[in-house]
């Protein structure tokens, strides 16, 4: 009996010692809450055509309450215009038929975004002869009380993709944080190996300045991993930037929760600290 008690005592002592020596990690501040980030999500594959087609097929990942407000729609579209519409979807992509299996039984079948947009614009005032999709689209917009703003945006998009020197009659309002996020996304998409580090660093500092600390951390961790895959060498400058964000010692579970709860740059592709 005494021997059993001794064994139990030793086991408890060892467990206590091991638990006190659990691996720790460092995390930083959480991402700031922005209302628009509930609806506007970063596309890690940079394939905006695929995003549109998936949205048409499967619906949205959120209720889009922020974007349904016409004032917010203008801010988002105005931010897109500042960055440049064709940096997201080229004129060639805009006019390319959508030969995807998603649309074999829909009114989008073999139509380009240009054709779909033209039908949406025409069906606003007279829906006779148009597929019920277009009729129901405008019925939903009228229920949300944003149909006039949506129509103006559609007309402006069409003008920007079909005219050589488009001049908008409207001065579109924009939002600085959205504009910055979109700007750096397009720069990241179009950067080659000679520019990627400079863009990543600028993007990192911008995210930090906007209180998006976890997103900044995810971004620079990914840049660090990509740099290593090219040169098989850890970049000291990236490691230094990570240390400016990862400041608080916590359990590794809390560390990963912090990174997974980022609001903008959610892509995680590394082995952690």
Image (cartoon, rainbow, N blue to C red):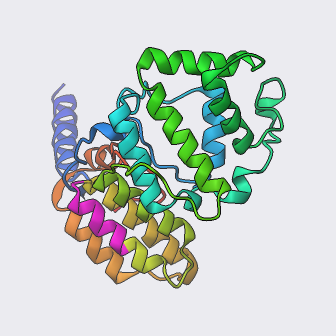
Q: Pick the residue in front: 28 or 198.
A: 198
Q: Quadrant of the N terminus?
A: top left
Q: Looking at the magenta stretch, what is its main secondary structure?
A: helix
Q: Position of residue 79 (x, y in %)?
A: 39, 53
Is 207 left, or right, of 74 in this rendering? Answer: left
Q: Quadrant for residue 248, please give it.
A: bottom left
Is 151 left, or right, of 129 in this rendering? Answer: left
Q: Residue at x 77, y 26 (%)?
A: 107
Can you say whether 237 is above or below 46 in the image? Answer: below
Q: Pick the residue in front: 54 or 85.
A: 85
Q: Position of residue 22 (x, y in %)?
A: 24, 51
Q: Position of residue 50 (x, y in %)?
A: 66, 44
Q: Quadrant of the C terminus?
A: bottom left
Q: Is residue 210 magenta?
A: yes
Highlighted range, magenta: 201-211
Can you say whether 252 is above or below 59 in the image? Answer: below
């Amino acid at each position: 009996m005494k021997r059993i008690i001794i064994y139990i005592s030793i086991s408890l002592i060892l467990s206590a010692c091991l638990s006190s020596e659990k691996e720790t990690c460092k995390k930083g501040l959480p991402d700031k809450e922005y209302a628009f980030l509930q609806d506007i999500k970063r596309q890690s594959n940079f394939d905006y055509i695929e995003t549109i087609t998936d949205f048409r097929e499967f619906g949205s990942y959120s209720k889009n309450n922020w974007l349904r407000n016409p004032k917010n729609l203008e801010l988002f579209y105005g931010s897109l215009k500042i960055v440049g519409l064709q940096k997201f979807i080229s004129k060639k992509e805009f006019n390319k038929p959508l030969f995807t299996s998603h649309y074999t039984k829909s009114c989008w079948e073999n139509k380009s975004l240009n054709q779909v947009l033209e039908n949406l614009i025409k069906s606003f005032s007279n829906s006779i002869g148009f597929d019920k999709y277009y009729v129901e689209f405008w019925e939903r917009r009228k229920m949300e009380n944003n149909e006039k703003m949506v129509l103006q945006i559609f007309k402006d998009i069409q003008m920007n993709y079909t005219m050589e020197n488009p001049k908008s009659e409207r001065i579109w309002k924009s939002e600085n944080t959205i504009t910055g996020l979109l700007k750096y996304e397009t720069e990241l998409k179009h950067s080659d190996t000679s520019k990627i580090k400079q863009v990543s660093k600028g993007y990192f500092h911008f995210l930090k300045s906007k209180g998006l600390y976890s997103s900044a951390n995810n971004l620079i961790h990914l840049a660090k991993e990509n740099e290593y895959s090219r040169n098989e060498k850890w970049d000291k400058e990236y490691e230094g930037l990570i240390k400016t964000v990862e400041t608080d010692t916590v359990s590794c579970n809390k560390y990963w929760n912090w990174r997974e709860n980022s609001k903008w740059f959610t892509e995680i592709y590394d082995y952690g600290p």
